[in-house]
Amino acid sequence: MPSAPPAADRVYTHVKQAVLDRRYQGGTLLTEGELAEAVGVSRTPVREALLKLEMEGLLKLYPKKGALVLAVSAQEIADVVETRLLVEEFAVRKAVPAPARLLERLEELLDEQRRRADEGDLAAVAVTDRCFHAEIVRSAGNEILSRLYDQMRDRQLRMGVAVMEAHPDRVAKNVAEHAEILAALRAGDAEGAARCVRRHVSRVKVLVRGEDR
């Protein structure tokens, strides 16, 4: 029987997942005592986990008060969108002609995203959404680029859930836009695929400004 993960790791996973799927929203103050009770550990591993999450930019620690969940700022969203466009437009162009295994994997992820959307599981939709884009980036075969993209994972998941909560209609639109990207890849249309990616990824900034149509 496998041993249980260390206490600090259990707290870290609990808090991080709750922040990413927005059960702990920006502005929430978390106390060591509450977290220790929720996870069933002492306060020492809670402190260790919170320090790690502060280093990752998800929390701000206040001695004797607790940890504040940091809200996603407009600047952070703009920075993520800009970086995603640089990486993803390059990757989707390089993916053409797309190998059969990439097209099959993207189709699987699209089907899973539809299922998760039907279930109303926004956190799972955000994960499959992010996986769809990550598969295209990985297909470019540039390990440095893939690692750079992976560093944005947590921010993408958190933003994805936030956007879908604020704009429920975006769930179906995201699926439709992914289908357009996949269709362009199937057709071998590198520039068409890049245009689809730009329109799709840029939408995040527009949604934050409340200007989506």
Image (cartoon, helix red, strand yellow):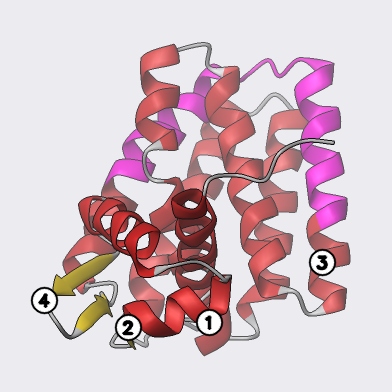
Residue labelled with disc 4: 63
User: Of the residues under marks 2 and 4, which one precedes in the sequence?
Assistant: 2
Tell me which corner region of the image, top left, top right, bottom left or bottom right, holds residue 67.
bottom left
Q: Residue at left 41%, top 34%?
A: 149
**Circles 2 and 4 in contact, beta carbons < 8 Å:** no
Comparing labels 2 and 1, the label whose residue is closer to the camera? 2
Instruction: Find residue 130 and report its horizontal and vertical position in percent.
Output: 58, 49
Earlier-in-chain disc, 3 versus 4: 4
Q: CA distance from mark 2 to mark 1?
A: 15 Å
Residue at left 50%, top 53%?
7
Residue 49 located left or right of residue 186: left
Label 1: which residue? Answer: 23
The residue singled out by tag 2 in the image is 31
Q: Please state the horizontal and vertical placement of residue 107, each as a whole percent of the image.
A: 84, 41
What amino acid does circle 4 point to? Answer: Pro
Q: Main secondary structure of the magenta part?
A: helix
Q: Regarding mark 1 in the picture, which secondary structure is present there?
A: loop
- For the residue pair 49 and 21, the one nearer the viewer reads as 49
Q: CA distance from mark 3 to mark 2?
A: 32 Å
The answer to whether residue 201 shows anywhere in this view is: no
What residue is pinned by disc 3?
A: 116
Highlighted magenta segment, given as a residue range: 83-112
